Amino acid sequence: MDWVSSKVHKGDQSARKIGFPTANLDPHIIEESYRLGIYGGFVKIDHRQFLGIFYFGPNYLKNSLDNIFEVHILDFDANLYDQIIEVKLIKFIREPEKFNSIDEATKKIEEDVKILRNLVLETGFA
């Protein structure tokens, strides 16, 4: 996937409440050939590049099958609402899952972040 741009939209803060704030992006910027799931990739904000864990899939937290596209930006904490950011998906990590509890979801997201950090250490992830 090439770099694509999207305006960051305000969501319902549900990911922030469990310790993983996300930037909510326009799901239509994802090519139809991409499968639903969790990806590792990059985010550019004001010419700075960060690692990100991306979710592209149904909005299970709202019991909706409408696809959403959001990114948790590692080592970043600032308000991005209404800003344009660039993103690039690099590595598919896993299929989307519906969780039975917030604790279950939190543990899985922690695992995803660990997988991404290990990919960077082991492969350079570029």
Image (cartoon, rainbow, N blue to C red):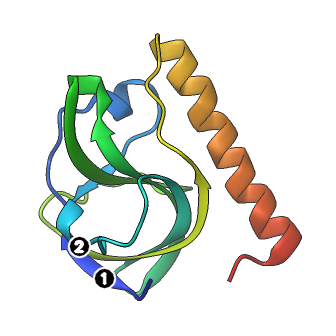
Task: Give the quarter of the figure containing the C terminus.
Answer: bottom right
Q: CA distance from mark 1 to mark 2?
A: 7 Å
Q: Is residue 53 above or below residue 97?
A: below
Q: Please tell me whether residue 115 is drawn above or below residue 58 in the rendered image.
A: below
Tell me which amino acid carries mark 2: Ile
Q: Residue at x 84, y 67 (%)?
A: 121
Q: Secondary structure at mark 1?
A: strand
Q: Which mark is residue 111?
A: none
Residue to which mark 2 is pinned? 29
Q: Quadrant of residue 51?
A: bottom right
Q: Are marks 1 and 2 in contact (CB under 8 Å)?
A: yes
Q: What residue is disc 1 on? A: 4
**Can you say which quadrant of the picture contains the N terminus?**
bottom left
Where residue 29 appears, x then y in whole percent? Answer: 23, 73
Residue lying at 12% horizontally and 63% vertically, measured from the top left: 82
**Residue 26 in the image, given as x and y percentages of width and height:** 18, 63
- Residue furthest to the front in view is 33
Left or right: where does residue 14 sit relative to residue 1?
left
Residue 104 visible in rendering: yes
Badge 2: residue crowd in 10 Å (few <14, some 14–19, many ≥20): few
In the rendered image, which quarter is residue 93 located in?
Answer: bottom right
Left or right of residue 8: residue 94: right
Is 14 situated left or right of 71 in this image?
A: left
Work out whether residue 65 or residue 39 is closer to the camera in this orientation and state it: 65
